[in-house]
Amino acid sequence: MRAAFNWSKKRLLAVLVGLAACSSPDQPTDQPTLNQSPSVRYTAKRVVLPDVPQRGRILDRHDSVLVDTRTQYLLKLPRRGQLDTLALGELLGWDSTTVRRRIVDALSYGQASRGYAVQLSLTKAEAERIRRDSSATVPQLTLWERPRRTYTSPAAAPVLGYLGAEAQAFYNQAKRYRRGRFYRLRNGGVEAYYNGLLAGHRGYLHPLVDAQGKQHGSWAKDTAFQQGQDLHLTIDVKLQTYAEKLMGGRKGYLVALDPRTGEILAYVSGPVYQASTITAPDQAGVRTKLLEHEDLPLLNRPAMLANPPGSVFKLVNAAVALQMHAITPASAFRCDQSLVNCVHRHPPGKNLTAALKYSCNPYFYRVMETLIDCVPDTLAGDTIAARHANLAQWRRYARSFGLDSALGVDLPREAKGHLPTPAYYDKARRTRGWTYRSIYSLSIGQGEINLTGLQMANMAVIIANRGWYYAPHLVRSVGESGPLPRFTQKHRTLIDSVHFAALVPGMVAVMQRGGTADASSLADVGIKVAGKTGTVENDEGDDHAAFVGFAPADNPKIAVAVYLENAGFGATAAAPCAVLVMEKYLRGSIAPKRKRWEKRIQNRARREDF
């Protein structure tokens, strides 16, 4: 028995030694299945094929190249005090002001006073002049070239993002100036989200070889070479550039979607900055301004910032109230200022269409009150339980709009927003016996409701489509394969389509004579717009301006959400921006009637120097 046991131990040891010999010491491997004798020893190798994949390009919806890998020319300057800036300017064709500005921009503020050497990005023509003439004129210069991601347009910075490997200087600055806050400001855009597809991958072989170098099968499946895939965006770069001019240096966002597909046509986060700033070697000073600016231009507002939506949320409340039979389209409530103030005088809300047209706050106070307190419930006699059940039902219907959850846009991070639950109020009010009067701000889109810009725009899409949507997305095709599969899945709300149809006449009336946004009508160019304004109360400064809408109202092709922080009324600040983007997209130009209006908005939106 002992002899048999020793023989088994020796055989087991031989098998283990044979398997160990199949693994390269620096490459993890799966255990191979072998039919040979345990005494045969193979070595597992990993052979890298010579072809190196080229990173894919990023193009707009009309195939204009926005980002590509091209040769970048860098000029390294000697330390300050050793450089003849006058001679350098003459060599490059720059005036003295340009030389000083470029050098200052290449330094962060902390370095500017310590004489650091800097690098300047040059054009090909400027690089040729350096090669030809610098040895005699400014002999201390060093020029080299390298492949880098190149931005062909200054637009769409939060969409395009940046390659992490090229943003190390920014990361270092951000950690130094903002520390923990840096992670909130970080946004690699589609460059980071689709990194694996853009980068492609090299080919690898996995042979098992014997001591003589002869191959005996493979220890793992070979990996095929894959070229980097191009990304074809949903963004229209001309529309994006136009929308950014309207936003400029103001805080806020503008999101435009195609309701039929969920494709994002324009995606603006303000204040606006140039797309190349994060990775450009000579923009350290500008990056410092971006990091230190009180308005947080690096914050990706449409996806990451959730705000109270204001009166535009009356559309959701009305749809839910119709579904829960709390009201009908013919329901009438008087404008009782003792309940909640209306910001302007208007005719009575004799029905839902009129209430939307005039955005009557007391009307929607009553709508929500009826929904919470008076909807028939099986818990008759227990008003506290009924109130909890009705609020939970309201939230269930509202969440089906994609609220209080990430929509799944193809960007690295997205906020969920917030819709309060009955348990939330139990805790906040420290009692289960809270009443409607303590939560009435929900009726006008204030209080505990928070929506992102993507959710606001998608809300308009849902109404335009009478109850369904595709998740908003920025890439319409990866190579030739179309969008990611999840962006072709149709999502439906829990609201019947007939109730969305009941909202549209009121939204159209908003843009007509007497409506809250009648000055923003596009009727003169034959475009019927459906919209809703919002003015969001702000205890810390001027009110925020909001607007959502779509056009043409009867056959929607574009839906827009605009949110301008501290800009005042939605009707006078947000609605004009939205309809100009609609007109630009649908007609290609702005009618002469609105040219002065357009110029005034652009002048007001003049961007900061970054």
Image: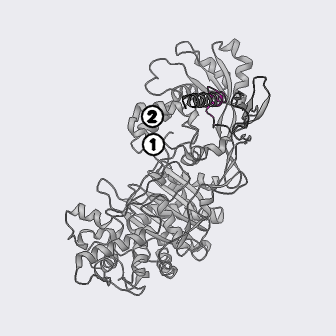
> Can residue 263 be seen from the camera position used here?
no
Dot 2 or dot 1: first in sequence order is 2
* Residue type marked 2: Ala
Q: Quadrant of residue 283?
A: top right
Where residue 73 appears, as percent x and y from the top left, is 67, 27
Task: Left or right? Give the position of 572 relative to 158.
Answer: left
Is 51 magenta? The answer is no
The Cα–Cα distance between marks 2 and 1, rounded to whole angstroms, is 9 Å
Task: Left or right? Give the position of 298 relative to 590.
Answer: left
Q: Name the residue under label 1.
A: 185
Q: Mark 2 points at which residue?
A: 174
Q: Return the residue found at the far bottom.
A: 330
- Give the extent of the magenta segment: 18-29
| Looking at the image, residue 549 lies above or below residue 155 | below
- Relative depth, front residue between 31 and 491: 31
Residues at marks 2 and 1 touching, judged by CB atoms closer than 8 Å = yes
**Quadrant including the N terminus:** top right
> Can residue 286 be seen from the camera position used here?
yes
Local secondary structure at mark 2: helix
